[in-house]
Amino acid sequence: MYIFAARFVACVAIGIAALNTIDASGLAPTYTVTADTDSENTVGPSTGQSINHGAAANLTETRTPVNTASASDPCGNALAGTGSTTKPTMVPCKVAATAASSTTPIVFYTDIVSGPNIGGENNKGIYLAIFGRNFGTSAGMGTTTKVFINNVEVDNYRYLGISKGRTDIQQITVQIGAVGSPAAVPLPIRVSVSGVDSNIDKTFTVTPGNIYFVNNVTGVDTTTTNTGGTFTAPFKSVQRKSGASISFAIDSAANAGAWGRVRAGDFIVMRGTVTPYTTNAANGVNNGFDNYFLETLNKSGCAIGTNCAQGGGTTSGPITIMGYPTEDVFINNPYNATTDAGAISGADSTRIIAGFGHWINIVNLRIESGNHDGAINTQAGGTNWRIVNNELTCATAVSNTTAKGGGIAGDAHVTVAALGPSLGSFYLGNYIHDVFNGPDDGNSNFENHGFYIDGAGNYDIGYNRIENIRGGNGISMYANGTLGNNNVDGVSFHHNIIKNTGKHGINVADGSRNNIKIWNNIVYNTDLAGIRFNTTDLVSAKIYNNTFYNINRLNNAAMGAIVNNTNFISSNAVDIRNNIFVPVNGDYDSLDFNLKGTVTNNLWFNGTGVNPASAYSTSSLTTNPLFVSTAAANFRLQALSPAVNTGTSAVSAVVSDDFERTGRPAGAGWDIGAFEFQVVSGGALNPILFFLFD
């Protein structure tokens, strides 16, 4: 009989030799598969077969069995012959080649994309955090693991470890130093590990700017506009209520906190002091405008090279609020029924239209806000916000039934020409968890979400870890009409984890319309649908290569694993391909399910009711996807998973890799689900696949 290595008996090896490794672009290796024989069989072909990673080699065994009455091969075929039959038996079977992920470092994203190379701590410029994989260990930081900007090594290294977002993504933080004093142009970032270089498509631009430090314990809010805020003499407050203004002004920290001093391109670096920053502090310290911790009411950053008046008129670049490397900078904004505002907020509607509250970076902070506007809220129209590597909670909203901001609320539909060309909104690598909307007793309003996207824009939402969103959806796209934002457009939601939601995993709701792309996400343990549609405006929403598991835990017949609560107007409203749907033993789809568009090459399992694979999901499967371990939430595919090589390449314009950034396809065809099949073995190629012949 045949048997896999996992079931060990005396064996014959089928050698699989790797001819090359996976490079930074994710290209797959090839293998040579050669079958061996023993005294009882002959396995062919006798010469090696060259196959791609994840592909299958066809082997045929000719047996001369002695007693094969109950024998079978690993493909499940019964072997012919009984007793002492010596009749040869031809048994075709497929052997899947497997490989580990590459050890080549790969950079996914950075926290900031511009900043000064002088000033700040020891006059070494700003700190930069780089995120990716295969960065080595902290012991090699600055020795075997190095960072270069435009081929010049950075000045010093601060941290190498896991990121705040996905725990399988590493972070290396540096202080850039002079980096050759280059001109203000995008410069390639390179991570080198033991001489092996990363991709260089992520860039950093050196721009002028001040770096102000804040320490809420030892700092002093000075009364002048030219003293304080240094590394050794920090300010005490980020923003003070007394300095609230509706037009740009340079103000003293004593009146407006560090915010009073900043212009476009400047940084406020907050020190972690164990003592939380809070809006409830005495004497107005860190009590920001309009009861927020920070409201960007009277200032704005602007595009690099555009000296906008809203940013002071003499400098350019975003305004950045940054947590100091390696320190826990905690902004605590617990629910307060009297004020009920939020933690960090964009400007009000009037000021947004006037060009204030745009081009803001929020990086490396921990924020709790149980109030109405949540942890970070760009407000209606706030564009070009970059929110990266933060831990955001709304735990105290368990007492607030009016909370609606959630972890991050973004609305980027207002365009202000004076601020320069837009780059878009980037919400990357955040850990958003414990978001409530009143008690978690099943009677919540479910309007406080992990992400709440409200308005047209260009949103890049990726690599986030979104867990325990008991007050709503993992992400909700819903246009409420404020300032004419009647539609949600331009959302790219990718490489995220959504786990344990009180409502849906992904909600594509009212006003969601054009350029919606959702790919390479893992969504599991949702009380209601894995993905819900509720919009008549939707056109060609691309739902590709996602894995939905243990969804509709409440077994709500009105929901199902996937639900559409409205009749689409467009005949091509959705394009749903290469997804895995595994509900909790309930309906695959809702009672009023009615999709218009393309639904193909999906895998469905464990549901009841209408079988999508025979009703509307063409070229699809209804079978066990064979995940590695659902108990461990490991949704990678086993070697014999029916999802391997059974997807469609029609997704290639959007999907070029998988959840772990392994290049697709890695085998003979595209896989279904968030993972492309591979075997990880200590970061090296797995050269041998064993089969047993008895």
Image (cartoon, rainbow, N blue to C red):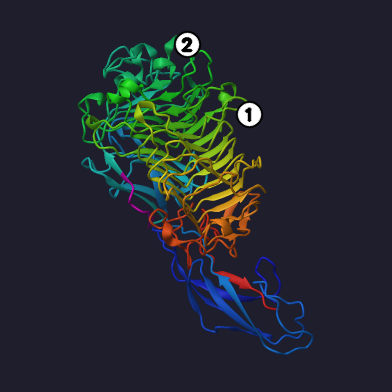
Residue at x 43%, y 68% (from the top left corner): 20
Q: Is residue 200 magenta?
A: yes
Percent x, y of residue 24: 39, 58
Quarter where residue 628 is shown? bottom right
Looking at the image, residue 486 lies above or below residue 524: above
Percent x, y of residue 315: 22, 29
**Left or right: where 198 falls relative to 435:** left
- Decide: few, some or many residues near mark 2? Use Cα within 10 Å; few <14, some 14-19, many ≥20: few
Residue 432 circle label: none
Does label 2 or label 1 sit earlier along the sequence?
Answer: 2
Residue 440 circle label: 1
Looking at the image, residue 263 lies above or below residue 412: above
Q: Is residue 484 magenta?
A: no
**Distance from the alpha carbon under mark 2 to that under mark 1:** 33 Å
Quarter where residue 360 is shown? top left
Magenta residues span 196-203
To which residue does mark 2 refer?
Answer: 282
Q: Quadrant of the N terminus?
A: bottom right
Q: Which three-letter amino acid code belongs to the residue tagged 2?
A: Ala
**Left or right: where 468 falls relative to 515:** right
